[in-house]
Image (tube, grey):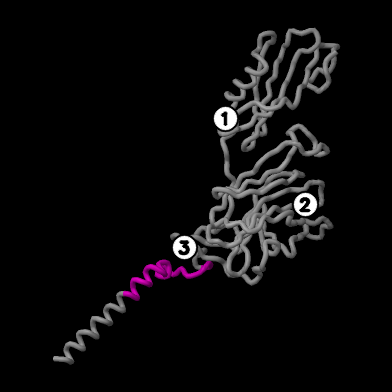
């Protein structure tokens, strides 16, 4: 009788252990039964490849990181994807030939690092990185990227273009959104002009890459209402037209053009204003430009900055 009880107890114990092992394997290795245990297998199975370094593959809710040998210990010593091309930085810079045998170099440098930012909620010290890229010309192109802290070092993400020859200012992180403040020029100004227009680029970290946060721009109907309220309707001209241009995030520009003015001196007038988005309400800002089209023999026949005589 004792032997029978012992045999029954042993059988039940074995069944319970096998059941527990099966449950654990189902919960922790759900993809293994489909033959997916690493990055290469995930990629082969059609997983989504994230634009990061090292690359990451996402399949059925699981993330597989590509194994690499050159993960270093700082945001200045990892790789970033810029315009679809990977740049491996060493001591804050990376250099490639623009073309085989060319003397011109494609140079990427770290401009600034904002450290100790927890971007992914794991309490690690991630970093926001501003990069510059030059290729032998006069342009200095600025990008924003992220370096995510992992056990081996830092994972660099894709980089998002911000502007050419801008003046970087503050970088802030709040509510899972990165705000990069910088100064730029008006659309009609040359690069010889100083930067005086405040702008902000907003990006968000998705877990493996960053994406630009698109905000609704200024509509022509809203701009028309604001500009006509400020400058008046077409009462002594043939036509009036309102345009919106270079709208980005919280700052845009609106122009109002009067043609066929009943005036002895000028036949046309164009006025440009800055328009700001304050708490989702567009408000008219400074007048930044006035241009004149003159009557015959009274000055320039195309719109220009000179006042008609």
Between marks 2 and 3, how big is the CA–CA gap?
A: 37 Å
The residue identified by callout 3 is 62
- Magenta stretch, overall SS: helix
Residue 129 screen position, x and y as percent: 67, 55
Which quadrant would residue 231 be assigned to in this image?
top right
In which quadrant will I find the C terminus?
A: top right
Q: Are marks 2 and 3 in contact (CB under 8 Å)?
A: no
Which class describes the residues within 10 Å of circle 2: few (<14), some (14-19), or many (20+)? some
Residue at the spot 72% in from the left edge and 22% down from the top edge: 271
Query: Which residue is tagged 2?
Result: 134
Place residue 190 in its image quadrant.
Answer: top right
From the viewer's perspective, tell me whether residue 268 is left or right of residue 242.
Answer: right
Q: Crowding at label 1, few (<14), some or many (≥20) Cα neighbours within 10 Å?
A: few
In the displayed structure image, the side of residue 7 where residue 298 appears, left or right: right
User: SS for tag 3?
Assistant: strand
Query: Looking at the picture, how far across and down is residue 273, in whole percent?
Result: 69, 26
Q: Is residue 104 magenta?
A: no
Indicate the position of residue 198 as horizontal and vertical percent values: 70, 38
27 in magenta: yes
**Residue 167 location in percent, x, y?**
75, 44
The disc, 1 or 2, on the residue closer to the chain's N-terminal end is 2
Can see residue 84? Answer: no
Q: Which residues are magenta?
A: 20-40
Residue 173 in view of the camera: yes
Q: CA distance from mark 1 to mark 2?
A: 38 Å
Residue 208, quarter of picture: bottom right
Residue 50, compared with residue 279, is above or below; it is below
The first of marks 3 and 1 along the sequence is: 3
Q: Are marks 3 and 1 in contact (CB under 8 Å)?
A: no
| Mark 1 vs mark 2: in front | 1
Task: Find numbered disc 1 in the image and state the secondary structure of the residue it sits on.
Answer: strand
The residue pinned by badge 1 equals 281
């Amino acid at each position: 009788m004792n032997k029978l009880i012992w045999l029954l107890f042993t059988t039940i114990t074995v069944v319970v252990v096998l059941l527990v092992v099966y449950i654990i394997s189902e919960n922790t290795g759900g993809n293994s039964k489909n033959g997916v245990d690493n990055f290469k297998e995930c990629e082969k199975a059609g997983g989504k490849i994230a634009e990061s370094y090292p690359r990451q593959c996402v399949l059925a809710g699981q993330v597989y990181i590509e194994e690499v040998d050159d993960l270093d210990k700082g945001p200045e010593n990892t790789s970033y994807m810029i315009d679809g091309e990977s740049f491996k930085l060493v001591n804050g810079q990376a250099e490639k030939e623009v073309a085989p045998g060319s003397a011109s170099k494609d140079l990427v440098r770290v401009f600034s690092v904002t450290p100790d930012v927890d971007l992914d909620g794991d309490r690690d010290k991630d970093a926001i990185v501003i990069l510059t890229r030059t290729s032998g010309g006069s342009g200095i192109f600025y990008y924003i990227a992220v370096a995510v802290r992992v056990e081996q070092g830092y994972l660099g993400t894709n980089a998002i273009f911000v502007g050419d020859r801008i003046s970087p200012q503050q970088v802030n992180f709040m509510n899972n959104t990165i705000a990069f403040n910088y100064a730029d020029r008006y659309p009609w100004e040359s690069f010889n002009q100083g930067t005086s227009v405040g702008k902000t680029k907003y990006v968000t970290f998705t877990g493996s890459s960053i994406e630009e946060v698109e905000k609704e721009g200024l509509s022509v109907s809203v701009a028309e209402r604001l500009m006509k309220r400020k400058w008046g309707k077409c009462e002594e001209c043939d036509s009036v037209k309102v345009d919106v241009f270079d709208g980005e995030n919280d700052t845009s520009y609106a122009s109002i053009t009067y043609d066929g003015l009943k005036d002895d001196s000028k036949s046309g007038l164009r006025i440009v204003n800055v328009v700001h988005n304050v708490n989702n309400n567009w408000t008219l800002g400074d007048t930044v430009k006035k241009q004149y089209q003159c009557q015959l023999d009274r000055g320039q026949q195309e719109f220009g900055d000179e006042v008609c005589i």
